[in-house]
Amino acid sequence: MYRSGIGDPPLRSSRSIRGVEHPSFRHRSPLLTMGLALLLQSCDSRANGSPGPSSTPGSPTVLTVGGSIVSASDIKIREQVIAVKSGAAEGMSEGAYAQMLHGLLFVEVLAAMGHPITEAMLEEEIRRIDQSTHDPQGLADLKKACGGGDSPSYRRIGILPDFANRVFSQQVYPRAKELQSDRRVEAEKLLKELSRSAVLENEVTPIPANSPWQRSISLFSPQLGFEPMSGPGDPPIHRPDAPVGESRWLAFERDYLIPVEMGKFCSSVIEMDDRFLLLRWIQWEDQNHRVRRVEQLWLPKRSPSEYFLEKASAIPVWIADPAIAESLRQKVSWARSLSWRRP
């Protein structure tokens, strides 16, 4: 797999979900918005050893997410967690609902993918945080807000959501090749169509309308890789006469551009870090330095947040207070795509 090169145009990716501060008060998660919160504060567990869909005895249920139940007491605890992390003392009820809803969706998605968070995993994460935190007082305040470091509330409200986020974004998602399989198939299908259509050398290649496909013209050299086209008044680009050693762009040229005739697409889909690329060599820009003008058609890979929201939209969610539910749908973009119904 090749990384995107210098001069590659930015992808118009889907809106990413903002990260939240980890209970260690040191790490920031790359994936989810508004803070991911909670599971529950009961000691019950599922048969497979993961935290169970329980709530505080005697406290009314105010939120359900799939099989998980959240009580009014859970909301109050989450409000205190927000106060510890942000310093805000009031007006956190709606934020607590949003964080708990998002966090439980995240845990449910992991379980549906066959990667549930188990009690043993939580225990190991708690030990790691205790040993590595750079803010002992902040961590102590968080434990106190949850009812103590040994309380079920600390495990499920203070630890579980951020830990589940990290498991998904750093362990499960990067290793799940099947998450991108449909886009690779789509890229291979378009490449076959273009190979049959005999696009002329200087023609603009048509791309499917109303699709995520994107197109650009750029330069490519074995010295510098992909470069943007120079504009009027731009200084000349200095290139050495030959690549130094076996650079990755020298290998890229050998594998994808040298075997293909000018005007033709490379015979295979090129997988980059963030996209599936179809590449066509249009003409020489500077033959002495092996600088080619190339056309790039690319299909962005599905982002972690995009895949997460696709899965989350199938999970039934319900909030007892209709006003809070409607407010979240109005104010929080990801909440609009959820399946709002009581399970």
Image (cartoon, rainbow, N blue to C red):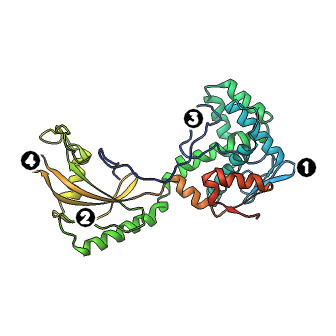
What is the spatial separation of the Cα atoms under label 3 and label 2, in whole angstroms?
A: 46 Å
Q: Is residue 261 above or below residue 173?
A: below
Task: Kindly give the residue lying farthest to the left in the view shown.
Answer: 288
Residue sitting nearer the eye, 222 or 122:
222
22 relative to 46 in the view: left or right: left
Label 2 element class: loop
- Residue 313 pos. (x, y %): 63, 61
Q: Are marks 4 and 3 in contact (CB under 8 Å)?
A: no
From this viewpoint, is residue 73 visible? yes
Q: Residue at x 49, y 54 (%)?
A: 14
Q: Earlier in the sequence, mark 2 or mark 4?
A: 2
Please, what is the three-letter code of the amino acid marked with disc 1? Answer: Gly
Q: Which mark is residue 58?
A: 1
The number of numbered badges drawn on the structure is 4
Please, what is the three-letter code of the amino acid marked with disc 4? Answer: Asn
Reading the image, the residue beneath label 4 is 288
Q: Is residue 96 above or below residue 276?
A: above
Task: Kindly give the residue lying farthest to the front in the view shown.
Answer: 232
Q: Are marks 3 and 2 in contact (CB under 8 Å)?
A: no
Please, what is the three-letter code of the amino acid marked with disc 2? Answer: Val
Label 4 element class: helix
Q: Earlier in the sequence, mark 3 or mark 1?
A: 3
- Residue 141 pos. (x, y %): 73, 28
Q: Residues within 10 Å of mark 2 (few under 14, many from 20)?
A: few
Reading the image, the residue beneath label 3 is 27
Q: Which mark is residue 204?
A: 2
Please, what is the three-letter code of the amino acid marked with disc 3? Answer: His
What is the spatial separation of the Cα atoms under label 1 and label 2, in whole angstroms?
A: 67 Å
Q: Nearer the viewer, mark 1 or mark 2?
A: 2
Q: Nearer the viewer, mark 4 or mark 3?
A: 4
What is the spatial separation of the Cα atoms under label 1 and label 4, in whole angstroms?
A: 80 Å
Q: Residues within 10 Å of mark 3 (few under 14, many from 20)?
A: few
